[in-house]
Amino acid sequence: MMDHTILSGAQHEEHLPESSYTEEDIIWEDHFDGDGLNTEYWNYEPHEPGWVNAEWQSYPDQKENETSQNIYVKDSKLFIQAKKTVHADGTCSYTSGRVNTQNKVVTMYGRMEARIKMPSGKGFLPAFWMMPNDEDHYGQWPKCGEIDITEVLGDKTDTAHSTLHFGEPHEQRQGSLVLENGDFSKEFHEYACEWEPGEIRFYVDGTCFYTEHDWFSKWPGEEKKPYPAPFDQPFYIILNLAVGGNWVGYPDETTEFGENAQMVVDYVRVYQKKIG
């Protein structure tokens, strides 16, 4: 067992469940063994700066990624690289990467798992998370729901956060785990979510540190949707590295944009229990 401290949002440690999923339950995985991103599984997701959360980066489209190297596969790993460009007039711009499995790898319930080495530096926010394949099923965010399997702030790389977003007005539930030894940006760690009807559990390196079953789907002028809505619909996987934002803050004079500014993904897996 790793040395860690549960910061918030979890049951007492002696009651936290161990995972019951095994390799026999894997229904999909990507080990990034090819020469590039497998577009049978993944979509590039381009966006302009400031699209959400007052973030500074743009996410270039696929063609630009091939030249800018924000997203690439090397040594059987996926690299998402944040970059800074200083222009002649002294202004700066930032690029990074975001990929998703929408309409390609979609699941409802099961275990979602990835082994990742996180970036380090003020203003970086890497995320392994999920959104509904059909955001209109219960209404646009946050009514549709969001499952953040893990996020690690670049200037606090000993702490992993797992969060559920839902409702209108927006509410969230969050649990956090801090390492007593180690650093999420210096070595790979395994992050996972086990999602079942009425319960969602979050794990780091096999340790369940947060279990949640308190959420709802209701907003003004509408009837409350039956529990466990909105977490009772197919979701897809997202991997991205944001630069700046309302929560993480912004890069400063200490922030470097070299190998430290990489989110490196060893693999992603989806497990589901077989019926019968």
Image: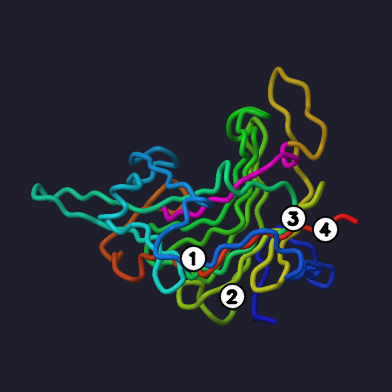
Tell me the residue that label 3 is attached to.
Answer: 110
Span shown in magenta? 230-242
Image quadrant in which the C terminus is located: bottom right
Amino acid type at circle 4 is Lys
Residue 32 numbered mark, or none: 1
Q: CA distance from mark 1 to mark 2?
A: 28 Å
**Rendered image: mark on residue 179:** 2
Residue for point 68% across, 68% down: 6
Q: Are marks 1 and 3 in contact (CB under 8 Å)?
A: no
Dot 2 or dot 3, earlier in sequence = 3
Q: Of the residues shown, which amino acid type is indicated by label 3?
A: Gly
The secondary element bearing badge 4 is classed as loop
- The answer to which of marks 3 and 4 sits earlier in the sequence is 3
CA neighbours of label 1 inside 10 A, class few (<14), some (14 to 19), many (20+): many
Question: Mark 2 is on which residue type?
Answer: Leu
Give the mark, 1 or 2, whose residue is nearer the N terminus. 1
Q: Residue at x 59, y 75 (%)?
A: 179
Residue 72 lies, with reference to residue 148, above or below; the image says below
Between 190 and 121, the one lying in front of the other is 190
The kind of residue on which mark 1 rests is Phe
* Label 2 vs 4, first from the N-terminus: 2
Question: Disc 2 versus disc 3: distance between alpha carbons?
Answer: 26 Å
The numbered disc on residue 274 is 4
Q: Secondary structure at mark 3?
A: strand
Q: Answer whether labels 2 and 3 touch (C-beta < 8 Å).
A: no
Q: Upstream in the sequence, badge 1 or badge 3?
A: 1
Q: Is residue 33 visible?
A: yes
Callout in the foreground (1, 2): 1
- What's the distance in space between the residues labelled 1 and 4, CA to CA? 26 Å
